[in-house]
Amino acid sequence: MVEILCPHCEEEIGLDDDAVGEFSCPYCNENFTWDGVIDGKSADYDWKGFWFSFGTPNLFIILAWILAAYLDGVHERAEVATTNYSDDALGWLHLMSFLSWITFLIYGIKERNKAIWQGALTAIATVPVLMVLGFLYYVEATDWSMF
Ligand SMILES: [Zn+2]
């Protein structure tokens, strides 16, 4: 038994393993052909969803460190006393990164969108790397002022 999605209404249909040919969907009565190749489904792997769920948490991290370095620069150059908002930027954007990550993960699992939860899981591997790189960039850009 294989589970496939109707190409018309996206309902799940169970077919025999060796079933091939023309079928009529029990939900919407539309006809579709099934060639029995389950791996062929990788052709409609949601790559856009993957890059979106993978990219968004990473983007927030990159943004966090660039913005923090920028705000720190603004603070340093200011003639009058100003508040340094770089810590706020770091905190909020890392929080946004985490929230977007958990949203994609839950959404991907709930909607059974393999590409989306796989994108979120792939982000776990790259986000810590970006955090370290971002930190190094920040330290360099702010002339080691935090030490
Ligand atoms: Zn259907």
Image (cartoon, rainbow, N blue to C red):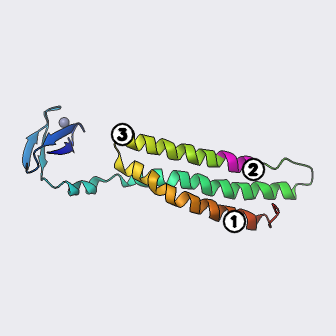
Q: Which structural element holds mark 1?
A: helix
For marks 3 and 2, the one nearer the N-term is: 2
Q: Which structural element holds mark 3?
A: loop
Which numbered tag is attached to residue 87?
2
**Which residue is most to the right?**
80
Q: Are marks 3 and 2 in contact (CB under 8 Å)?
A: no
Q: Which residue is mark 3?
A: 111
Q: What residue is drawn where x is 28% and y is 53%?
A: 44
For marks 1 and 3, the one nearer the N-term is: 3
Write down the quadrant of residue 133 in the picture: bottom right
Q: Is residue 66 left or right of residue 39?
A: right
Q: Which residue is mark 1?
A: 137
Write down the quadrant of residue 107 in the picture: top left
- Amino acid under disc 1: Tyr
Disc 1 versus disc 3: distance between alpha carbons?
Answer: 37 Å
Ligand 1 within 8 Å, label 3 CB: no
- Amino acid under disc 2: Asp
Magenta residues, start to end: 87-92
Disc 3 versus disc 2: distance between alpha carbons?
Answer: 36 Å
In this rendered view, identify the residue nearer to me: 71 or 117.
117
Disc 1 versus disc 2: distance between alpha carbons?
Answer: 15 Å
Ligand 1 within 8 Å, label 2 CB: no
